[in-house]
Image (cartoon, rainbow, N blue to C red):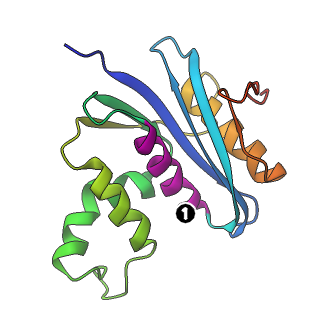
Amino acid sequence: MVEKIIAACDGASKGNPGPAAWAWVIGRADGSVDRWEAGPLGRATNNVAELTALERLLEVLDPGVPVEVRMDSQYAMKAVTTWLPGWRRKGWKTASGSPVANKELVVRIDALLTGRDVDFVYTPAHQVDGDPLNDAADRAASHTARTQEAASSAAGAPLPPP
């Protein structure tokens, strides 16, 4: 049996919209981080950053390995787990009849989720003694939103400090 991967992803936008970035971390149940990556988005909303973080995480993971994805974005989680089936049935319209925001990202994430064992776990952001993996992803996304420079453990960069 393949061991479940524990990961967190987060997006940040300084101004919403404003300078934005995405980040993901892969770690362990004790909160230690094994690897991470963050990338700039230029000017974007927090929702685009959150969805992009999830997309980038799913792109690097082996689709045959189960994963627990920790996120602090209710919007991103609900978009790809709860609302997506209804949007698809309604021709990519919301309940009010408006076009679905960020449809292209949602469609790409849906394709990446197909056939995968993914458990989404909501974790509140910015909590004292909160989820350490979510905190690490938040720090990486926030730092990259400010610098607009990609960074990763693969490139030898340390995680931004708290």
Q: Is residue 92 magenta?
A: no
- Rendered residue at 28%/48% (across/down): 113
Q: Quadrant of the N terminus?
A: top left
* Quadrant of the image occupied by residue 58: top left
* Quadrant of the image occupied by residue 31: top right
Find the residue positioned furthest to the bottom: 97
Q: Is residue 73 above or below residue 85?
A: above
Residue numbers of the magenta segment: 46-60
Rendering coords of residue 161 (x, y %): 79, 26
Q: Which is more toward the observer, 132 or 147?
A: 147
Rendering coords of residue 134 (x, y %): 56, 33
Main structural element of the magenta stretch: helix, strand or loop? helix
Q: Is residue 49 magenta?
A: yes
Q: Is residue 33 left or right of residue 156?
A: left
| Numbered label tally | 1
Q: Which is more toward the observer, 145 or 116?
A: 116
**In the image, what residue type sits under mark 1?**
Val
Q: Is residue 129 left or right of residue 90?
A: right
Q: Is residue 144 left or right of residue 65?
A: right
- Rendered residue at 46%/48% (across/down): 54
- Rendered residue at 20%/71% (across/down): 86
Q: Is residue 130 visible?
A: no
Q: Secondary structure at mark 1?
A: helix
Residue assigned mark 1:
48
Q: Quadrant of the C terminus?
A: top right
Q: Is residue 45 visible?
A: yes
Find the residue positioned furthest to the front: 155
Rendering coords of residue 14 (x, y %): 75, 59
Q: Is residue 120 above or below residue 30?
A: below
- Rendered residue at 47%/15% (across/down): 28
> Badge 1, how many Cα within 10 Å: few under 14, some, many 20+?
many
